Image (tube, helix red, strand yellow):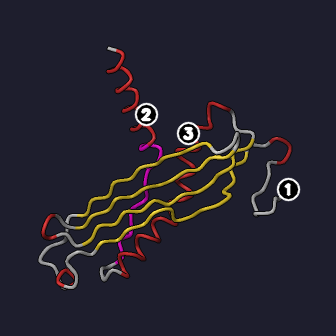
């Protein structure tokens, strides 16, 4: 049996590792549709869509972390820009009985993985309400993103050491 606190998050029974989502929220959001209504008609070709993803985390308490998933999406370029979407979606997570060497990967991989379905739905709804077909973002490999950021950080650290 597990203990439940007032917000529905469950505690870890008998020292078992646990990851709980305490809150999720839309932190910042912008949707720009600069060429509407001209851009809403049929297009000659499919627009170039670019999506940039970033994960940030901040420790709030010994066991609590705020994790934010940011997306910058664009469809089209220059004068042919259809839309631009900027989104920051956050969550507060509690990690209990997690070995110290596993905290950072869990915060930077598993927490954004839990946020992603909600971010994906917000993007699809916003593009649809903006007059376009819904943009369904493909699943993100947060392990690869974590490894890429670690490699970049390692490269910067070695460049600064020289």
In the structure shown, which secondary structural element does the residue marked by tag 1 occupy?
loop
Q: Which residues are magenta?
A: 134-145
For the C terminus, give its image quadrant: top left
Identity of the residue drawn at 19% across and 77% down: 35
Residue 4 appears in which quarter of the rendering? bottom right
Viewer-closest of 45 and 5: 5
Viewer-closest of 91 and 17: 91
113 shown above or below 29: above
Q: CA distance from mark 3 to mark 2?
A: 10 Å
In the structure shown, which secondary structural element does the residue marked by tag 3 occupy?
helix
Residue under circle 1? Answer: 3
Left or right of residue 48, residue 91 in this image: right
For the N terminus, give its image quadrant: bottom right
Residue 125 appears in which quarter of the rendering? bottom left
Residue 92 coordinates in the image, percent (x, y): 62, 54
139 shown above or below 66: below
Residue 130 coordinates in the image, percent (x, y): 33, 80
| Mark 3 / mark 1, whichever is N-terminal | 1
Identity of the residue drawn at 32% across and 58% down: 51
> Is residue 161 covered in magenta?
no
Tell me the tag on residue 105: 3
Residue 101 coordinates in the image, percent (x, y): 62, 30
Identity of the residue drawn at 39% across and 62% down: 138
Tell me the tag on residue 150: 2
> Is residue 137 covered in magenta?
yes
| Mark 3 / mark 2, whichever is N-terminal | 3
| Mark 1 / mark 2, whichever is N-terminal | 1
Q: How many marks?
A: 3
């Amino acid at each position: 049996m597990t203990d439940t606190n007032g917000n529905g998050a469950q505690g870890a029974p008998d020292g078992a590792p646990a990851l709980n989502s305490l809150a999720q929220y839309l932190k910042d959001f912008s949707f720009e549709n600069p060429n509407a209504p001209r851009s809403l008609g049929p297009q000659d070709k499919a627009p170039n869509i670019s999506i940039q993803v970033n994960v940030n985390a901040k420790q709030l308490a010994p066991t609590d972390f705020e994790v934010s998933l940011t997306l910058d999406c664009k469809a089209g370029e220059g004068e042919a820009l259809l839309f631009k979407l900027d989104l920051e979606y956050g969550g507060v997570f509690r990690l209990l009985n997690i070995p110290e060497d596993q905290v950072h990967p869990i915060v930077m991989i598993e927490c954004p993985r839990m946020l992603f379905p909600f971010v994906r739905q917000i993007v699809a709804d916003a593009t649809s309400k903006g007059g376009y077909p819904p943009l369904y973002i493909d699943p993100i490999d947060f392990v690869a993103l974590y490894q890429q950021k670690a490699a970049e950080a390692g490269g910067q650290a070695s460049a600064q050491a020289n």
